[in-house]
Amino acid sequence: MSATAAPGIARRRPATTRWGVAARVVAAFVAGYFVAWGATAFLVLVLPMGRADRVVTASLLSFAVWCAAALYAFGARTTWRAWWVLLALGVGTNALAYGFAGLAARP
């Protein structure tokens, strides 16, 4: 087999290292938790329900958000992209939640 791939054939990804996998695991846990935390805070503010229902619904949805963030951490093209996208999402959702808390629907 030649060094260059034929047109139409996908190239193989370089082998991942132990440090790369460890960095993705930490991104999935830490940055994923940060995204889920921000999503929970944001959803508590914007869901149109009573306070107790908002908190329960947002808390339950946070597990799905954390799972999606963990899936993205392992599916991202590079480890750095996994980190910066998850951290940007976490900062964005937390900024929305804490920056506009006064405008929240409070029945």
Image (spheres, grey):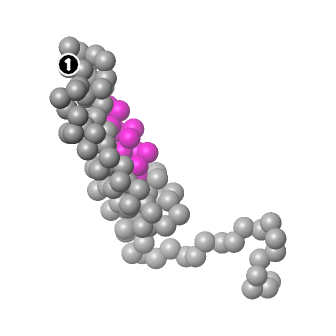
Q: In what quadrant of the picture does the N terminus appear?
A: bottom right
Q: In what quadrant of the picture does the C terminus appear?
A: top left
Type of amino acid under label 1: Arg
User: Which residues, given as a range, are shown in magenta?
Assistant: 60-70
Residue 46 inside the magenta-drawn segment: no
Residue 68 inside the magenta-drawn segment: yes
89 over 5 or under it: above or below: above
How far across and down, in percent of the image, does residue 14 sit? 58, 76
Judge by depth and name the residue closer to the eye, 46 or 31. 46
Residue 12 visible (yes or no): yes
What residue occupies the far left of the structure in this picture? 102
Can you tell which quarter of the image residue 19 is in? bottom left
Residue at the spot x=50%, y=74% of the render? 16
Q: Which structural element holds mark 1?
A: loop
Residue at the spot x=66%, y=72% of the render? 12
How far across and down, in percent of the image, does residue 10 sit? 72, 67
Can you tell which quarter of the image residue 64 is in? top left
Residue 35 visible (yes or no): no
96 over 31 or under it: above or below: above
How far across and down, in percent of the image, does residue 32 sit? 34, 51
Residue at the spot x=20%, y=39% of the render? 98
Q: Main secondary structure of the magenta part?
A: helix
Dot 1 corresponds to which residue?
106
Relative placement, left or right, of 99 versus 66 is left
Residue at the spot x=46%, y=53% of the render? 72
